[in-house]
Image: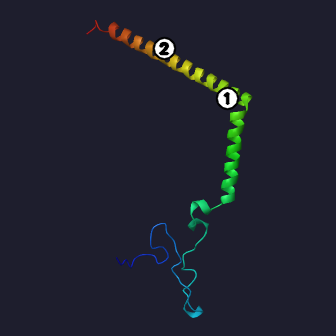
Amino acid sequence: MNNNNQNPGFPYYGYPYNAYPQQPAAQQPNTQQMPQQNADAQPYKKQNSKTHFAMGLVAGAAAAYIIGNKKFRQGVSATGEKAWSAVRGEVEELKERLEDTQAELEYYRNLHKGDE
């Protein structure tokens, strides 16, 4: 398969390579036209490995703190219970409003039923 429309620096999608082998100085192509190989060309695992390690260390420390601290867990669970009870109360209030609205609609339908 010969595809002449391909960019010589990137023959496959997502697979960069150096398409310009070492040539004598007089024959080297213009460096502005060469594809740039920067940090984006490296695989994800090789980019900022120290940063990834630090982020994992912080996440692990936070998880250990949450699991090991009884007061923190109790505070989180108490907050969750309060939020859930508030949601349940609002749902019950919404159900009551819906029932009241249905009752009013039924009343007005029956009120004008005899006029027809």
**Dot 2: within a 10 Å radius of its alpha carbon, few (fewer than 14), some, or many (20 or more) residues?**
few
Compute the Cα span from label 1 to label 2.
Answer: 30 Å
**Secondary-structure class at tag 2:** helix
Q: Amino acid at mark 2?
A: Glu
Horizontal and vertical percent for residue 61? 71, 43
Position of the C terminus, as image quadrant, is: top left
- Against 71, residue 115 (above or below) is above
Q: Residue at x 44, y 70 (%)?
A: 12
- Against 78, residue 23 (above or below) is below
Q: Residue at x 59, y 20 (%)?
A: 85
Q: Amino acid at mark 1?
A: Val
Q: Residue furthest left?
A: 116
Residue denoted by label 1: 76
Label count reads 2
Give whichever of discs 1 and 2 has the lower sequence position.
1
Horizontal and vertical percent for residue 25? 59, 91
Dividing the picture into quarters, in which one does residue 30 lie? Answer: bottom right
Dividing the picture into quarters, in which one does residue 24 lie? Answer: bottom right
**Secondary-structure class at tag 1:** helix
Residue denoted by label 2: 96
Q: Residue at x 53, y 77 (%)?
A: 18
Discs 1, 2 touching: Cβ within 8 Å: no
**Residue nearer the viewer, 25 or 62:** 62
Horizontal and vertical percent for residue 89? 56, 18
Left or right position of 110 against 85:
left
- Against 96, residue 74 (above or below) is below
**Dot 1: within a 10 Å radius of its alpha carbon, few (fewer than 14), some, or many (20 or more) residues?**
few
Horizontal and vertical percent for residue 80? 62, 26
Position of the N terminus, as image quadrant, is: bottom left
Q: Residue at x 63, y 22 (%)?
A: 82
